[in-house]
Amino acid sequence: MSKPHLRLSGVHRHYGEGDRMVRVLEAADLEVQSGELVALVAPSGAGKSTLLHLCGLLESPQAGEIEIVGQPTSKLGDRGRTQLRRSTVGYVYQFHHLLPEFTALENVVMPQIIAGKPQKAAEERSMELLDLLGVAPRASHRPAELSGGEQQRVAIARAAANHPRVILADEPTGNLDPETSDLVFEALKSLIRNEGAAALIATHNYDLARRADRIVTIKNGLVVAHTV
Ligand code: ADP
Ligand code: MG
């Protein structure tokens, strides 16, 4: 079997010190393979966002190793981390953060232009993604003209624009109704399968999580299989 796209081993993350220390992760391990979608279900405050920030190299653990596409990150400096994040990680948030003055297409094109891709190739890639996510007919609309579910699918397309090997989504359906959540989750799933990315999705929605390949939770500082 090939190396997992995402691997955490012995990861410690706490905040504060002394009596006020909040221990979020203590020796946590996790592996996510290419094309695998793992749902992270845990109560509010359990550490879901912390875990995603660590996986996305937005925060560093106090101990342990995080490997992305086989590359250990604990010894990287800020620049190395930023570079690796930009080339390998796509992030989706609960609120889409699309740029309001640009169309759906332009929002997906932009990160590719920043990464140095020619305009035409960037537009082709964007249309392919918008199509895969079922929002191609909305390509020329601005975010304000899109429904919540459409906005979120455009945000997923944007996160996937530069072929990230790891996709992290922090409650991406958190502000959508159940039917729209279903649609967005299924779109995300077909994207993961198509692109062979590894995905970790934090969600409160257990009905959705059941459609992932695996469900994990955070318990006693560890990432463990979720049992009902
Ligand atoms: P979740 O996303 O599951 O709701 P978080 O990862 O946001 O949980 O938070 C986990 C715990 O860590 C909470 O107790 C939270 O208060 C604490 N925490 C998160 N970020 C910080 C921070 N920057 N400083 C201090 N405590 C934090
Ligand atoms: Mg959170």
Image (cartoon, grey):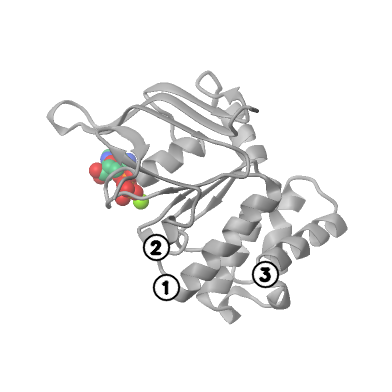
Q: Quick one: label 2 or label 1, which is nearer the N terminus?
A: 1
Q: Mark 2 points at which residue?
A: 207
Which residue is under mark 3?
Answer: 104
- The label shown at residue 91 is none
- Disc 2 and disc 1: Cα gap in Å? 9 Å
Q: Which label lies toward us, 3 or 2?
A: 2
| Secondary structure category for the residue under label 1 | helix
Indicate if the residue with disc 1 has its beta carbon within 8 Å of ligand 2: no
What residue is disc 1 on? 178
The picture places residue 131, in percent across and down from the top left corner, at: 73, 67
Vertical order, 98 against 85 (above or below): below
**How many numbered circles are shown?**
3
Observer able to see residue 179: yes
Which corner quadrant of the figure contains ligand 1? top left
Q: Is residue 154 above or below residue 37?
A: below
Q: Is there a contact, CB below 8 Å, between mark 3 and mark 2?
A: no
Count residues near mark 1 (Cα–Cα under 10 Å), then give few for <14, some for 14-19, many for 20+.
Answer: some
* C-alpha distance separating marks 3 and 1: 23 Å
Q: Which amino acid type is marked by label 1?
A: Pro
Please give left or right for residue 11 compared with residue 196 in the image.
left
Q: What residue type is labelled 2?
A: Asp
**Residue at the (72%, 78%) spot, across then down:** 137
Q: Quadrant of residue 152?
A: bottom right
Q: In this view, does 7 lie to the left or right of 18?
A: right
User: The residue under label 3 is which amino acid type?
Assistant: Ala
Name the residue at 49% across, 73% down.
180
**Are circles 2 and 1 on residues that touch, CB within 8 Å?**
yes
